[in-house]
Image (tube, coloured by chain):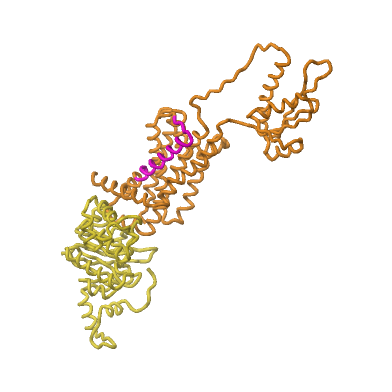
Chain colours: A yellow, B orange
Amino acid sequence: MAIIEVHNLKKSYDGKMAVDGVSFSINKGEVFGILGPNGAGKTTTLEMMETLRPIDSGTVKIAGIDVAQDPQKIKYLIGVQPQSPAFQDKTKLTEVIEMFAAAYGEKVDVMAFLRDVGLEEQANNYVEDLSGGQKQRLSITTALVHGPDVFFLDEPTTGLDPQARRHLWDLIEKVRDRGISVVMTTHYMDEAEILCDRIAIMDNGKIIAIDTPKNLIKQLLKRGFKKSLHVEQANLDDVFIDLTGKVLRDTR
Amino acid sequence: MKKSLFTVFTFAKINTRRFFRDGVAIFFTIIFPLIFLFVFGGIYGNKTGGVSFNIAVINQSNSSFAQQFVSNLESNPIFKRKASVTTLTDAEDKMSRAELDAAIVLPSDFGNVAKGSPYPTGQVQIVYTQNNQQSASALNSILQAQVQAINVKLVKTITPFTITMQQFNKNSLSSFDYAFAGLLGFSIIGMGIFGPVNVFPELKKMGILRRLSTTPLRVWQYFLATMIGQVAIGAISLTIMFIAAFTVFNLKVVGNWFELIIYLLVSIIMILGIGLALGGWAKNERQVAPLSNIVVFPMMFLSGTFFPRFLMPQWVQGISSFLPLTPVIDGIRLIANEGKHFADILPQIGLVGLWLVVIYFIAFRVFRWE
């Protein structure tokens, strides 16, 4: 059953199509990854789904509600993890959770949410004392404080060390196990391969492939792809480069 | 509605707590106005004895009468004699540099007793510059009175009409009492404008407001939460200023306290709106700094915070009377110092109300989450 339906979504900046007629649907309880080089339109697509960017044309429906028509209702259904989470300084972790819950008009068991992400020991610390990975975890728990149906993450592991990344993967799987649909963007193919049930690969504002990681690799091998050193194995990295080319993209 | 207000109060509570953890913010909203209070209190508070004149006395006469006249002048607290000045050229030089208000010259024949006359005669000269006409005429009347007293002693005359003076001290206002309203205005503008102007663009730069905009939090809830926090902080800051003014500078408030407090609270909210509009509109600090200076400085100097408005040229007074801070300071002054009631200050209340509507209309329109 689809929880998100995106139909022919478009967005242009200064005449350049950032998102050019994207359509896909995301099933309830799955982890859906949006992959692509810089400037492919991943973040813009995500932001239109999150009510952060006005939609030029096309529709996004979450749980049957049109994002453009009723953004306020959508906000109760979604949790958002921004690319680089930041919090007001001189604020305790408990207060951060309290505030985010209050934004939804709710009062929650603050310690339970901190325990969920292993931050109960830092409960009375100020947010500026947290490490990058701890901030990511705090941000995740604030996004879930109101029990959303969909959880959006924009490049959640960028800049984290391998341990913090793996910890975050576990967390995202735990979220998925609660029945929350997860939509994430990433640059890391291993991350997508391990976490995502299905992925969409974007380039130049268009989706150029959408399937499970396994199927995408299978299809590549069917086309006669062979790795130069390891004879028969290919991974998602290869799929990605094959589809989007090797040219370095520096634009955002 | 209950849920909406729960949101507002939670944000207000946590943000106010945050404020009290921030030493720099405390310094600028509470300590900084207090420093100004003490500086201006020091300037205005010491003038308890009223006016005095810096004068030079140039005595060119050798008569004993002249000597006595001079020592009489010296014992009068109104005159501060510069004893080092003994020649007219020296005095003129000092007057042109405003170090002296006037020179009193006793000519060489002053106090001489003419042949066949039972009493001494003479003419006192007051020498002054163009800039000191007011002091000179005041000096003139003082000396006139002294001379008159001497004359009466020397020659029996009948005086059918006389003038007596009596000082009326009850409930009068010191210059500090007047300056205090301006200092309150300075404090209100400092916390109301520089608070949000410093905080909002930084929150935007870090993406904190953007993150909040993905929650159902509304702009009015965010504004109202800021407002409640600001009023609480403002109440504390102004209370401290009042306590300092009462204990150190003998502040006198003759008006109704209830009306004064209501007027102060509404003023804090109105001025805060300017900060919300500027900070809410600006994307970053660089954008907001010049604009907030353009808005704040005219009010700081023209609304009567430090310099009384009646000293300004007529056309400046005309313009400055419509600045948002002017009715705030005037209103405080009228209530606190002159004991006026709301019914007497309707023009000020109307202007504050009008600005309140205009400012918040703009603030809501220009607000951006990122």
Q: Quadrant of residue A210?
A: bottom left
x, y percent for residue A25:
21, 66
Residue at the limit of the structure toward the left, as seen here: A1
User: In the rendered view of the protein, which quadrant contains the N terminus of chain B?
Assistant: top left
Image vertical order of residue B255 relative to residue B224, above or below: above
Residue B33 x %, y %? 46, 44
Q: Position of residue B351 (x, y in %)?
A: 43, 36
Q: Which residue is drawn at the image coordinates 60% and 18% (left, top)?
A: B164
Q: Is residue A59 left or right of residue B73?
A: left
Q: Quarter-wise, where is residue B160 in the image?
A: top right
Residue A90 to residue A213: above or below: above
Looking at the image, residue B260 sits to the left or right of residue B85; the answer is: left
Residue A7 is inside the magenta segment: no
Looking at the picture, tell me which residue is in the foreground, B303 or A129: A129
| Residue A90 coordinates in the image, percent (x, y) | 35, 55
Residue B147 seen from this side = yes
Q: Is residue B252 above or below residue A219?
A: above
Please tell me whether the stretch drawn in magenta is mainly helix, strand or loop: helix
Total number of numbered labels? 0
Which of the pair A165/A10 is nearer the observer?
A165
The magenta-colored residue range is B229-253
Q: Quadrant of the C terminus of chain B?
A: bottom left
State whether residue B274 is above or below residue A35.
above
Which of the two residues, B266 or B261, is positioned nearer the viewer here?
Answer: B261
